[in-house]
Amino acid sequence: MAKQCAICGKKSIMARKLNKLRGKYNPAPKKRKYPNLQQVRIPFDTQRKNFKKFAGKRVLACTQCIKTLSKTN
């Protein structure tokens, strides 16, 4: 199971945390940041076209997609 939103395709990114030390930025290692994915069941009666493909299925979706889905019902 991929760590990727099934609806919008949001996936992990590489990020840097810059530490400021005595007025200069200290180089810091890269860290992978993952999206907030949740298991959710998509209802059959959804009206949005990007959710119709997953109607009735249980998928991994990011919280932004879950929020959008709750607004449609």
Image: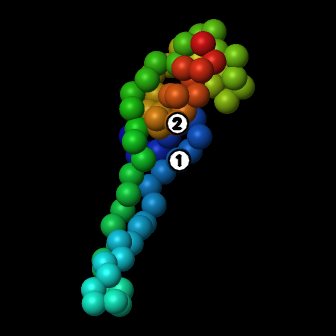
User: Quick one: label 1 or label 2, which is nearer the N terminus?
Assistant: 1
> Residue at position x 39%, y 52% from top?
34
Q: Secondary structure at mark 1?
A: loop
Amino acid type shown at disc 2: Gln
**Left or right relative to 29: residue 4:** right
Judging depth in this view, the residue of 38 and 26 nearest the camera is 26
| Residue 56 numbered tag | none
The residue that label 1 is drawn on is 10
> Residue at position x 35%, y 90% from top?
24
The residue that label 2 is drawn on is 64
Rendering coords of residue 39 (x, y %) = 39, 27
> Residue at position x 42%, y 66% from top?
14
7 relative to 70, above or below: below
Q: Quadrant of residue 7?
A: top right
Rendering coords of residue 45 (x, y %) = 63, 9
Judging depth in this view, the residue of 31 and 59 nearest the camera is 31
Kindly check if marks 1 and 2 are in contact, taking CB atoms under 8 A apart as contact: yes
Q: Which residue occupies the extreme left position in the image?
A: 21
Rendering coords of residue 15 (x, y %) = 41, 67
Label 1 CA crowd tier, 10 Å (few <14, some 14–19, many 20+):
some
Q: Note whether residue 35 is visible.
A: yes
